[in-house]
Each structure stands twice: as C-alpha cells, then as structure tokens.
Amino acid sequence: MRKVFALVLVLCSPAAFAQDKPPPTVGGKPLVQIKPKDAPKEPKAKPQSVAVRMLACLEIDDETKERLNCFDAIFPPKPKARVPAPKAVTDCTAFKEEDGRLKCFNSFAEKLPKPAKPPEPAAR
C-alpha cells in the first residue's frame, strides 16, 4: 500500500508543479498558438463598382420585388417623412413606398453608360 501511495505521489507531483507556473509569455504577453491553415483560400474577387452592380439589377425583370431587393442591397433604405426630388441615387433610399423607390433607382440606373467590353483576341 505504501508503494502504491509513493507511486501516486511521484506521478502526481509533476502535474502539481506544472499548474503552479503561469503560462509562458513573450514581452509580458501570453504566447498564442497558431492553427494551421486547412486549405489555401482563393484570392478575393475585386469589388465591383456601384455602377456595375446597378446595371446588373437592370437585368432583373422590371417592376418586381427582386429588382428592388437588388437595389436595396446596394443602397439600404432609410425612409423619411418628406422626400425632396432626388438629386443623387442615394436619395432614393428615402422613399417609403417600394414603387417610388424602384422608379427612382430605375431612373438613375438607366442613365448609366454601359461598361466597355474588352476586345476579343485576334485570330491567327
């Protein structure tokens, strides 16, 4: 019985000593464990301009909730009681009525110039 007690005491004492020490630090800050990356991530896509995203909304059927949701994703609505005549596309967010907001967005999006397409490579 004494041998078992002595064995338990010997095995448990290093654990007790290890708990007394604070975690290792560098410059007064605790060390941080870095996790390995699972898989290489694809490079992030270049963010599209507001004009390109608005033109993409024009491809959705006119006078539909989907088109309004597309515009609202670009410019979240901020309804106001009285709305003056919109001077910029961001003023469209002030309309409470969905139809008014959609017509406002359409009026600005239809005025945008279509982006130039890159030239096709010459055939040999």
Image: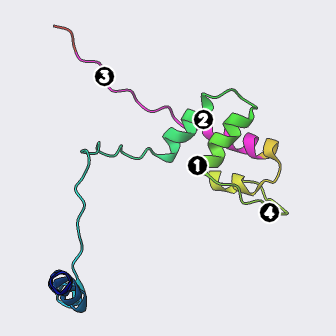
Residue at (23% x, 89% y) in the render: 22
Q: Which mark is residue 57?
A: 2
Nearest the viewer among 13 and 67 is 13
Amino acid residing under circle 4: Lys
Residue 86, image x and y in percent?
72, 54
Q: Is residue 104 magenta?
A: yes
Q: Which residue is mark 1?
A: 74
User: Of 117 and 28, which appears nearest the observer?
Assistant: 28
Q: How far is disc 2 from disc 3 in space, using C-alphas?
A: 24 Å
- Label 3 sits on residue: 119
Q: Secondary structure at mark 2?
A: helix
Q: Which residue is mark 4?
A: 80
Question: Which residue type does callout 2 highlight?
Answer: Cys
Asked if the residues shown at circle 2 and circle 1 are in contact, with their CB atoms under 8 angstroms apart, the answer is yes
Q: Secondary structure at mark 4?
A: loop
Tell which circle, 4 or 1, labels the residue nearer the N-terminal end.
Answer: 1
Distance from disc 2 to disc 1, alpha carbons, whole Å, reads 10 Å
In the rendered image, residue 75 lying in the magenta stretch gets the answer no
Mark 3 secondary-structure assignment: loop
Which residues are the magenta region? 101-121
Q: Earlier in the sequence, mark 4 or mark 2?
A: 2
Give how far across and how far down residue 106 sits, in percent: 68, 38
Tell me whether the residue at label 3 lies in contact with that at label 4, contact meaning CB atoms closer than 8 angstroms: no
